[in-house]
Amino acid sequence: MSGLSLETGSRDGTRLLRLKGGGDDTGALRDIVRALAEEDATQGIVLVISPAATCPAERLPDPDFSAALDAATLAIETSPWPVVAVIRGAATGPLLSLALACPVRLAWTGATLACPETRLGLIPGGGAMQRMARLCGAAAALAVLQGSPLVPEQAEALGLVDAVIEEDPVGAAASLAAELAGEGAERVRDRARHLADPAAWSAAVSDARARLSPAEIAARKAVDCVEVALLLPFDAALDYERAALSDLAGSSESRALRALAVAEARAARLGEGATETGELTILGAGPAGIELAAIALAADLDVRLCDPDPRALETSRRQLAAAIGGAPDRLTTGGIEAAEGAATVADCTDGTPPWRSAALARIGAGLPQGGLLIDATDSPDPVRCAREAGVEEGVLGLRLADPLKGGRLAEIILPETAEDEGPLGRRAAALFQAMGLVPLFSRGAAVVPALGAALLEAADHLVEDGAAPDSVDAALVRAGFAVGPFEALDRDGHGPAMARRRAMAAGRDPRRRYTLLGDLLVAEGRTGRAARRGYYIWNEEGVRLRPDPVIPSLAVAAREEAGIAPRPVSEEEIVERAMLSLLLEGIRLVDAGILGAASDVDVAVIHGLALSQSAGGPVHRADIRPLMTTRARLLKLAREEDALHWAVPDLIEEHVRTETPLYEG
């Protein structure tokens, strides 16, 4: 249950303030202030963060919420009776801020502590930065902000919690609170042990700042806040921290990151039954199998790699050791028989080896009830895979984004007839999340190839209009893409793109704009990195050297054939048209039922085509300006250029009529 509520009670004469799920989180924070202001005979106060309590960091930009959080932490800190915090669930974001305001913090063995704010382009609220730095020092506080969630033992070692309690942590806290009611407890703001060594504090700040890029705005602001803890009195440092949070909350980077967090949560569709398995069985010890195994092993999953060729298995073990930087201790290998009876099997066979059909039949026959078979081949097709395995259900497709280009997407392809992802789909999503990937469901087909083709088509149009391919790439890299579309095409080789163009040529509407430059490159053998020439010149090691000097003359020939006079093309126009093309293709995929929501488009573009998270996906970019403005721009392009390419999809028309953001669809 989302939201936050406060339940009051008592135990052994000690007042209990229990934060639970459900309700209004701002109201719950105000309830804490009211509860602490009540005058009654007490033997202490315990603040319990229960497992059901949730209060996302995305709420921090709301001024009312932030003010309520500040008031609650101040009320805890200034309470005449020391408040003992008991962390029984996930103390993340604002919940951790509340716990840090307590002079004593106990954690149950199953609890976690985390600061997700910088990943949202924010810093923690409620004075958390100042208190965390005083509790564990500058270096440790900055490490917590940039790291993974902490288990209680890690938090205790850092000084964020005072003790880890295995049984009845609320009872232990009640006893301690009763003792402290008479003795008192030192407030966190007054703890100065770590401040006593300003040289070490300043060195930690300098080291952290040196490791950050200028683009990591929130993380750099967090470093500033930790530095201020040394330089200013506590209340002045709190004011600085509040101003910093307010500045970040209004930034375009934070807005983009918060929108992406919403989109990722929707795309994963995790819920009841979404538990990952601890072991993954992989069929095929070729490049695809090794890639998936390396990702799983790096996430501390057990991997069983199966292939009938012992030499391939031995080679894969060496390659995996190199990939993960050590012996793959959680890897076991075996023949096809080792995959029989496995609960989760991924078919990563390369091509169509002669043994694949028989192997899938054996795996299908031994697939247990509720088992999961994943088609992770070059052309994932869950319907075909199910037919080959002789099973009627439990088969999904998988397409991984290219990790060499920075992609983290795990596209889970449902059969076209599937009503929803179901328990197995949610289990697959949980598995890929555990592997550090970002899951996204599509129905009947993979969407990243279609989006990549739309981006390349927009880039082709821009070059035909007068831009240079390397200028298009440079503009899009500056806009946040890890690799420009023409360099990406060279890296992958022009063959697949040309095959796709030829397959579409027969059914292409003659009114649809068609660019010739790619055809001319292929005709001259300029097919990319493998040929050492394409849009760029490449060396034998596969390193890009410079733009191919022949491209300008080929572009002139392509324009003359199309009857197009070149014109100046600005960097702003390059980025705008690329994003609009991605928006249109993505919304068409939603209209076709292949993607489930408009926000899924941003997940696919950011994690599948490796666009910077802080740049904002095409749907978010459309939402932050009036959608009517985007529609007007599309209609103008449709009139002046290509009525089919720039046609306004039905979903955009619907949201223009209802005046609602696409993210709400």
Image: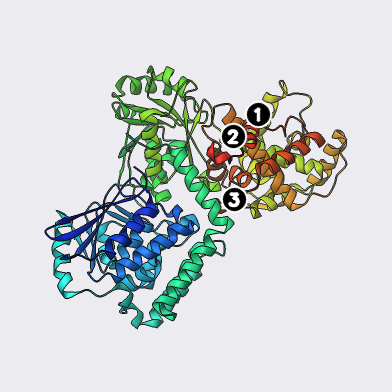
Between the residue at mark 2 and the residue at mark 1, the CA separation in whole angstroms equals 10 Å
- Residue depicted at x 41% and y 76%: 235
Is residue 172 shown left or right of residue 234?
Answer: left
Q: Earlier in the sequence, mark 3 or mark 2?
A: 2
Q: Position of residue 38 (x, y in %)?
A: 26, 63
For disc 2, the marked residue is: 449
Most foreground residue, 154 or 631: 631
Helix or strand or loop: what does disc 3 sit on?
loop
Left or right placement of residue 167 versus residue 485 in this view: left
Quarter of the image for residue 578 reads: top right
For mark 3, what is the residue?
Answer: 482
The three-letter code of the residue at mark 2 reads: Pro
Check the image and report above or below for 424 versus 485.
above
Asked if marks 3 and 1 touch (Cβ < 8 Å), the reply is no
Say what amino acid the circle numbered 3 marks: Ala
Callout 2: few (<14), some (14-19), or many (20+) C-alpha neighbours within 10 Å?
some
Residue 605: percent from left, percent from top: 57, 42
Q: Which mark is residue 500?
A: 1
Q: For residue 639, say whether it is visible.
A: yes
Q: Position of residue 270 (x, y in %)?
A: 39, 38
Is 107 rendered above or below residue 599?
Answer: below
Which residue is drawn at the image coordinates 65% and 29% (left, top)?
500
Q: Amino acid at mark 1?
A: Arg
